[in-house]
Image (cartoon, helix red, strand yellow):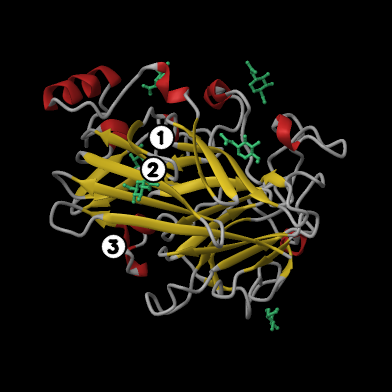
């Protein structure tokens, strides 16, 4: 079992390596903007996160389509939601009991959710809580880097990660590419972006009438009352439990149709791991998700190299977090329940504890494997 390294040990390691890819200065809160024709986006180093993303609506007015805070320091507020727009890692989503076995060694990592029952998004100090450094920045592209030492949050081996956000025009689109390179040991790696979308830009108080289309999401990975996989894989088309078709978005339907089910104890809505069932890379060019708001006419098409998508329709929001100043309209001033849709392109949730799913090559990386690469593209149009 590994001891969790302290921040002091981490700093000493980074200093000894003579690298400068870790900074604790306030630059981590400095907003940096990139742009291309018809789209611009702003980021901060704290969590390497997207804070603003403007695209034009059907009337050619720029609209900010992501959730975030106006004041970057608010992302450190521990009683608010601080995954907004962040990179989550080194292992996104939930790990049952905060333990896993890798090649005969048991690892015990911080159990930071559900009163200590499981790990969420990499532990107490996940990548969303870390100060990433700017490695490259120009008018249309920004790259952040993070060096994660051996043993930090209990994970084995040094992991060097780069995330590059790029904007392109005609059509306007954002690409996210997260490359994680294990330098010395085998380790679980499941990186993800964690962007909270509202392509209606808060014209309405919730997104339930916006439509969702996921042509390849034939199956989900069902979770228990704390959203830990039960181990079974379930069809959304021919399920053997009732209600039958809440999560069948293989045709375009309002997001609200997915609400006829539980998202964990005491929760009604979508917080589910969808499997992307398609031949890859043969169908790499095909969008795996389409989101559309009639309020703004903005349609977003998502492509990714990942084998799954975690979706969450913000059932936990309760009207306490303000929308950004540029999003206040029609009396909508706070993020309401079902006020957003989180889309996390990633591999199968807790696959490290389910060898029977055969996800090892997608989730365990080391000096002798290819690097981990999470790619996604968000393309915008209006109608
Ligand atoms: C990130 O930077 C802020 C501002 O300098 C600092 O307060 C905080 O401790 C840093 N976080 C980590 C995890 O180093
Ligand atoms: C991004 O676009 C919005 C809307 O056009 C604009 O208000 C803002 O100034 C732009 N940001 C930057 C830094 O160019
Ligand atoms: C932190 O977030 C909580 C919950 O959203 C809010 O009540 C509180 O005012 C925030 N703290 C600060 C300093 O803004
Ligand atoms: C749960 O984690 C604890 C360590 O925190 C460990 O002792 C125990 O064996 C684990 N339980 C299972 C079922 O893996
Ligand atoms: C910005 O940097 C990226 C990555 O190095 C490069 O591919 C691109 O051409 C650059 N764009 C401009 C406008 O300089
Ligand atoms: C699932 O959705 C598809 C596309 O709309 C539809 O053809 C099919 O009948 C649905 N199946 C079930 C079981 O709801």
The label number, if any, that marks residue 126 in the structure image: 1
**In this view of the protein, which residue sits in the foreground, 159 or 383?**
383
Mark 1 near mark 2, Cβ–Cβ under 8 Å?
yes
Q: Which residue is mark 3?
A: 360
C-alpha gap between disc 1 and disc 2: 6 Å
Q: Earlier in the sequence, mark 3 or mark 2?
A: 2
Mark 3 near mark 2, Cβ–Cβ under 8 Å?
no
The label number, if any, that marks residue 349 in the structure image: none
Q: Nearer the viewer, mark 3 or mark 2?
A: 2
Quadrant of the image for the C terminus?
Answer: bottom right
Q: Secondary structure at mark 3?
A: helix
**In this view of the protein, which residue sits in the foreground, 50 or 123?**
50
C-alpha gap between disc 3 and disc 2: 17 Å
At which x and y percent is residue 353?
35, 56
Find residue 118 and report its image quarter: top left
Q: Which residue is mark 2?
A: 89
Q: Is residue 27 above or below residue 275?
A: above
Find residue 79 and report its image quarter: top right
Count residues near mark 1 (Cα–Cα under 10 Å), then give few for <14, some for 14-19, many for 20+.
many
């Amino acid at each position: 079992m590994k001891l969790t390294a302290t921040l002091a040990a981490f700093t000493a390691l980074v200093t000894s390596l003579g690298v400068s890819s870790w900074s604790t200065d306030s630059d981590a809160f400095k907003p940096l903007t990139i742009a291309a024709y018809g789209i611009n986006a702003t980021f901060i180093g704290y969590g390497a996160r997207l804070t603003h993303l403007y695209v034009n609506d059907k009337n050619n007015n720029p609209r900010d389509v992501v959730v975030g805070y106006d004041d970057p320091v608010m992302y450190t507020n521990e009683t608010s939601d601080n995954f907004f727009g962040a990179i989550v890692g080194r292992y996104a989503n939930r790990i049952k009991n905060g333990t896993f076995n890798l090649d005969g060694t048991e690892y015990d990592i911080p159990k930071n959710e559900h009163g200590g029952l499981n790990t969420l998004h990499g532990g107490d100090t996940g990548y969303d809580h870390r100060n990433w450094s700017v490695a490259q920045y120009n008018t249309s592209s920004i790259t952040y880097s993070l060096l994660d030492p051996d043993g930090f949050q209990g994970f084995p081996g040094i992991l060097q990660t780069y995330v590059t956000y790029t904007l392109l025009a005609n059509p306007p689109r954002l690409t996210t590419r997260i490359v994680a390179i294990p330098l010395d040991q085998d380790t679980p790696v499941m990186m993800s972006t964690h962007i909270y979308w509202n392509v209606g830009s808060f014209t309405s108080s919730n997104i339930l009438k916006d439509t969702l289309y996921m042509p390849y999401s034939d199956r989900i990975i069902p979770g228990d009352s704390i959203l830990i996989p039960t181990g079974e894989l379930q069809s959304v088309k021919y399920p053997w439990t009732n209600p039958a078709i809440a999560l069948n978005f293989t045709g375009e339907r309002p997001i609200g149709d997915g609400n006829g089910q539980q998202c964990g104890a005491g929760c009604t809505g979508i917080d589910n791991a969808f499997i992307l069932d398609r031949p890859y890379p043969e169908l790499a060019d095909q969008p795996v998700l389409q989101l559309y708001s009639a309020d703004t006419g903005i349609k977003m098409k998502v492509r990714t190299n990942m084998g799954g998508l975690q979706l969450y329709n913000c059932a936990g929001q309760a009207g306490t977090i303000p929308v950004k100043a540029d999003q206040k309209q029609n009396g909508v001033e706070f993020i309401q329940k079902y006020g957003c849709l989180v889309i996390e392109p990633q591999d199968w949730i807790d696959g490290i504890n389910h060898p029977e799913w055969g996800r090892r090559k997608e989730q365990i990386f080391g000096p002798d494997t290819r690097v981990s690469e999470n790619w996604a593209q968000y393309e915008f149009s209006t109608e």
